[in-house]
Image (cartoon, rainbow, N blue to C red):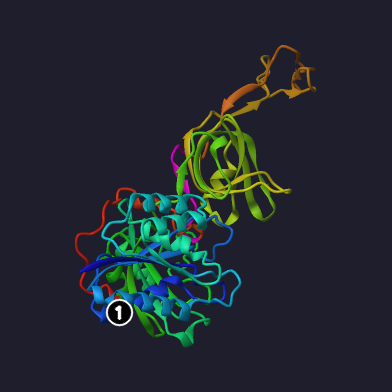
Amino acid sequence: MSTVHIGIDDTDSPKMGCTTYIAAILVEKLHKLGVSFLDYPNLIRLNPNVPWKTRGNGALCLRLRFDEPLAEVIVEQVVDDLEKHSDTDYKGTEPGAVFLFRNNVPVEIRTFARQTIQGIAQKTEALKLIRRFSAEAVGFKTGRGIIGALAAIGETLERDHTYELIAYRTPQNCGTSRKLDASSVLKMNKKTRPLTFNNVDPETGRVLITPRGPDPILYGIRGETPLVVKQAHEMVHSFEPIERWVIFRTNHGTDAHLKMSNSIADVQPYESTIVQGTVSQQPYIVPRRHVIFSIKNENVIDCAAYAPTGSLQKIARILIVGDLVEAYGGVRPASEKHSATINLEKLKILKLVQKNVFHNPLCPRCGRRMKSMGTGKGFRCDKCGLRSLKLKKNAVEEQRNIKERTYITSPRSQRHLTKPLCRNGHEKIGKPKTMIKDWHFP
């Protein structure tokens, strides 16, 4: 028996397609060939900040054991489906596939995967690794998808991971409104949370398991185990047929994209960072109710909490200069109109400073609140006429409606990789020892 790790990426466009759908088709066809799956299909979300990504920037890896005579058949099947189901007519779609025929994934490819998830990786580097470890690569057009395909192979999900069951529409329904029983989703969410997450937005009640684009996904349910996402799937009622479904193991909801920066000077464009700083500029609101503020340590950088982030935007508004925070988010590069900015996904309040409100002094003669006569001119009492240059305003501490804890964007605006707070305590390490019996259909 031989082992192969198959990575595919960059097959879809804003108009159609989905790389997970191609993987789902391959699961059915390869299963019929008699291969053994060593893991659930791995759905690896790559750096969400790269400017050339389509929707979720997801790459796929299938890990198989097979009889040696099937090697050529497997490669031909993958390449055939990649060509058939990729939107190669779209200018920005550059499909790629990589085949690594060996038991273990080399540490160098794992390191490359980490770089691709957290930063920017180059195709030349991917090709060097492919040649070095005698892998095979197939690319269409420029073949940029080879980068993500190799990264999907390299991310073996030995660290924290979650699961997602994705159900797919029939081709004739793609591009039409999705037809689900919303009440069944609400019931499912109530019965399975927090072992499933981000099914419904708590602020608006909006169902979140259905995407909005023309892709073939009907819905995706994310959770902590294969069994719970399958049970949740069985609770959801669809008013349209489901062509197929597959359970994926994934880095969704793990914060895998975030990279700790020791200093603001280390923060790089297009990366997702975690960096500490003191609020150095009072938050202000720009058009569309976005909130901007600055933090500093040795350097200064802007942070933005956009209106769709919901509760996070409201918290950002009430920060004051001197608060110590930890900012989490993707780094938008500087341009002519704005400086480099962290687009906030989370905000951890480490230390709040005291906020004082200053009141005019009370009249020492009659007890009435005095009035200012102008800067440097002292105070006067309208009741008894007393005037004084010696009296000062009194500082009174104001209660702040904010706590020292972590705040996060609302589920409706969370990125695939953003770790929800409800996942704290559910982290897991290492691939599962066994797979549930029915993890795909057909």
Q: Residue 371's quadrant in the figure? A: top right
Residue 419 visible here = no
Q: Is residue 177 above or below residue 142?
A: below
Q: Is residue 233 above or below residue 299?
A: below
Left or right of 232: which side holds 150?
right
Q: Position of residue 108 (x, y in %)?
A: 37, 50
Q: The magenta stretch spans which residues?
A: 403-412
Instruction: Please tell me whether residue 404 belongs to the stretch shown in magenta.
Output: yes
Residue closest to the eye, 287 or 3: 3
Q: Residue 232's quadrant in the figure? A: bottom left
* Quarter of the image that includes the N terminus: bottom left
Name the residue rendered at 67%, 21% in the picture.
Answer: 393
Name the residue rendered at 19%, 63% in the picture.
Answer: 434
Q: Position of residue 82 (x, y in %)?
A: 44, 76
Q: Residue 370's quadrant in the figure? A: top right
Kindly give the residue lying farthest to the top in the view shown. Answer: 390
Left or right of 118: which side holds 6?
left
Q: Which residue is mark 1?
A: 441
Q: Amino acid at mark 1?
A: Phe
Instruction: Please tell me whether residue 280 belongs to the stretch shown in magenta.
Output: no
Residue closest to the eye, 246 or 426: 246
Q: Is residue 192 above or below residue 285?
A: below
- Answer few, some or many: residues within 10 Å of disc 1's Cα (few below 14, many 20 plus, some between 14 and 19): some
Residue 346 visible here = yes
* Quarter of the image that includes the C terminus: bottom left
Q: Position of residue 204 (x, y in %)?
A: 50, 63
